[in-house]
Image (cartoon, rainbow, N blue to C red):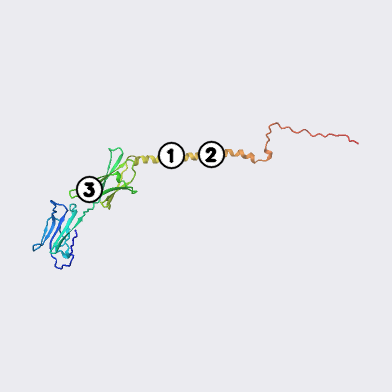
Amino acid sequence: MLMCVFDTTQNIPDLKITLVVWRKGTRGIKGIVPPVVVYDARNDPGELKILQEGYTFADTNFNNRNVSLLISNTKVEEEGEYSCEVTTDSGSGSATTRLKVTARYNYPTADKTLEKGRSNVDQTLVCNASGGYPEGQLRWFDNYKTDWTKSAKLTVTEDENGLFMLSSELPLLKGSTLPEYTCVVYNASGGKEGSISIPTEHTGASKANPATSTIIAPVVVIGSLIVGLLLAVIICKKRSQQQERRPSTLPLMGTRDDITPTAPYPYEPPPAYSVETRDNIA
């Protein structure tokens, strides 16, 4: 509804409305903009003329001097500037207003395709959203909230009703390990209207091979057993060597009599003691 309420500079209780005209647009053929709806009471009785489908007056009795325009089943093509013109038996006046049409986008859909013919691309994520107006935007985020929109390609098409369809493709390079991405739909004002998460599929080296895993597990167990046996053998060998060396320390704990001198020369006993007798001197 486009509001239009008129008033007078003076109090006129018996004011009579003679003509109300609503027009869409500011430019027409030869400067004349055709009306969409008209109320003409210049000749009794008053006559309501609907000149374009979908337009009518909100209150045909014009209570409280309200001559607002009502648009049913609003379409994108009805967006634009409108003028309200009122003529009474005491004077006339006009005003303009603008209708801005918005349409919410449908819930987004998503898909993914594996790329076999591209050398550096592993897979491509695709997100679609339709039925919105004005033109919005699709943005990509990973599970860490990192924005990947600059890496995507956005395609915008318009249907027969003037509504937009958004399609965005995000290629994932080989070696990417992020588990999922989220596609978010934003309207022209930057408001969030919907989102969908897409899990990724890792191929090649990034995806584990079950057969390889079953082979690796027994090899790891056998290798651990071999290492354990080698450590046990080394420890037992060191203990046996320590026991063989221990008797060599016994002489250090013996008595002095047990010690045999190791002189550099043969041992020679001292000469026998001799007693020399001298005469007494008087």
**Quadrant where the N terminus lies?**
bottom left
- Which badge, 2 or 1, comes first in the chain's sequence? 1
| Residue tagged 1 | 223
Looking at the picture, how far across and down is residue 182, in whole percent? 30, 48
- Residue occupying image coordinates x 45% and y 40%: 225
- Which badge, 2 or 3, comes first in the chain's sequence? 3
Looking at the picture, how far across and down is residue 88, in whole percent? 13, 63
Q: Residues within 10 Å of mark 1 (few under 14, many from 20)?
A: few
| Residue tagged 3 | 165
Left or right: 260, with 190 as reference point: right
- Which quadrant would residue 39 be assigned to in this image? bottom left
- Which badge, 3 or 1, comes first in the chain's sequence? 3
Most foreground residue, 171 or 7? 7
Where is 143 relative to 204, above or below? Answer: below
Where is 254 relative to 6, above or below? Answer: above
User: For the residues marked 2 and 1, what is the alpha-carbon distance in whole angstroms?
Assistant: 23 Å
Left or right: 242, with 26 as reference point: right
Looking at the picture, how far across and down is residue 249, in whole percent? 61, 39
**Numbered circle sitting on residue 66:** none
SS category of the residue bearing label 2? helix
Most foreground residue, 175 or 205? 175
Looking at the picture, how far across and down is residue 104, in whole percent? 23, 53
Identity of the amino acid at label 1? Gly
**Quadrant where the C terminus lies?**
top right
